[in-house]
Image: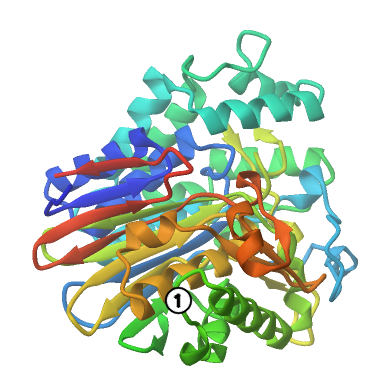
Amino acid sequence: MISEGLVVAASQAAADAGAQALAAGGNAVDAAVAAGFALCVVDSANCGLGGYGGFLTYLPPEGDAVEVDFNTWAPDRLDPAGFRRPGDISQSLVGGAAVAPPVTVPGLLGALERFGRLAPADVVAGAIDLARDGFSVGRELARALAEHWQKRDGGRPEFAAVYYPDGRPPEEGERLAQPELARTLELVARDGASAFRSGPLVDAICTAARADGGFLEPDDFLRETVAIGPAESTVFESAVIAGPPQLTSGTGVLFAALAALDPSALGENRSRGYVDEIARALLAAWDVRSAATNLALQSRNTTNLCTADADGGVVTLTFTHGPWFGSGLVAEGTGMVLNAGANLFAATADGPRAVTNMAPLVVRQADGARHALGGTGGPRIPALLLTALVDVVHHGLTLADALAAPHVSVRALERELEVEPELLDVAGRGLPMGIRDYGPTAGLTRTAAGCVPAVDPRFTTGVASV
């Protein structure tokens, strides 16, 4: 498939929403924001309007990459005793106490206002339709809802009212409508990010969190939450790779691993030398990362999308609300699942810091090719992206072939190699890595001929073109 504009997302419905934005005259940012809002409806195990944010990386047709950082922060009322200490990777906070200020909506709309062409109502329209009219439940959402049902004894009443309307988890292929979430999205379409600064949505979020031992107050939502500026970048052989801040994202490991690699030691693709050098570089990168950020080793459950427009712009976006369904709380009357982002905060000498593994990347190669790339899978994200970059830049594979190749990772704390089963004999050691140990990595490539998608064939990924 070669096209002028392209959207790759965790759901076909979300990809279609992004493509509709492109068809309406939007650029890659408009498409990413439209697909992101749609994912808040159809991929709600991994993200939502009540999420604590993520990162959007944009490589415009001209100029350097820019970054929209909408990670969360620690309000003053959060007792520092609840922060994880260096090396402590247990979950400290649950329920309302785990809810940090939601930043997904201000982040997406901040990107739209700065770099997009369309109005908020235009990019939210697809998500409203999906929530109001319903959508076909996908395999992963069905599995997540069934697991939540079993682990949480059916979930809290507000959650069950949204996701178990028939008194049971929906099966794959059944339709799920979310009328309260549709009304919340309509409010966002009308009022923009101000709906998450004050008013009934903010009051509902605070009430739900405080009723369950949380700490949020309305004045927490008045803080400026979105940072927009130049992306951080590094050079690997012929490529310039840009992504979110190293201090608070997975690029802190990824960029360090790229710097530690000895290309002459890689050997043939997926050979013993390749596996050994990838593992050595990853372990070295985790070693030099601040001990206070080790909590990110257990952080997982995210969603990712990539977009491209006819002008040459490419975007990659990764965001989350913590573990599946975040805190498990739903703010009454809103349909919004609230995040569990307070478990990201690390106590450091510089104060509390929220650290994630997310690392949405844009890549420019010397021959003019542009790539957008992102992954899910918690602490394995840096490894998945590292091997993809090595395969494309060093070995000359297409991005699609790189994502299809057997995965290699490490368990940093245990200093153990992980490989997919077909590499165990090649590696001569290591722990077998199953498909549930990581999530889909996806992206796209743009050349003078047009755009082509790159998806992990182990998973179902939505692709839409214009």
Residue at left offset 49%, top offset 29%:
181
Question: Is residue 122 rendered to the left or right of residue 104?
Answer: left
Query: Which residue corresponds to the image point at 50% horizontal and 37% vertical from the top-left?
Result: 43
Identify the coloring. Answer: rainbow
User: In the picture shown, does residue 450 fall above or below 242?
Assistant: above
Residue drawn at point x = 57 percent, y = 63 percent? 381
Judged from the image, the secondary structure of the residue bearing numbered disc 1 is loop
Which x, y percent locates residue 357? 60, 66
Residue at horizontal 40 percent and vertical 71 percent from the top: 391
Q: Position of residue 456 (x, y in %)?
A: 43, 49
Residue at the outermost top position: 166
Three-letter code for the amino acid on which mark 1 is drawn? Glu
Depth check, front residue: 60 or 364:
364
Q: Is residue 428 above or below residue 333?
A: below
Residue 140 pos. (x, y %): 55, 33
Circle 1 sits on which residue? 268
Viewer-side residue, 148 vs 158: 148
Q: Which quadrant of the figure has residue 338?
A: top right
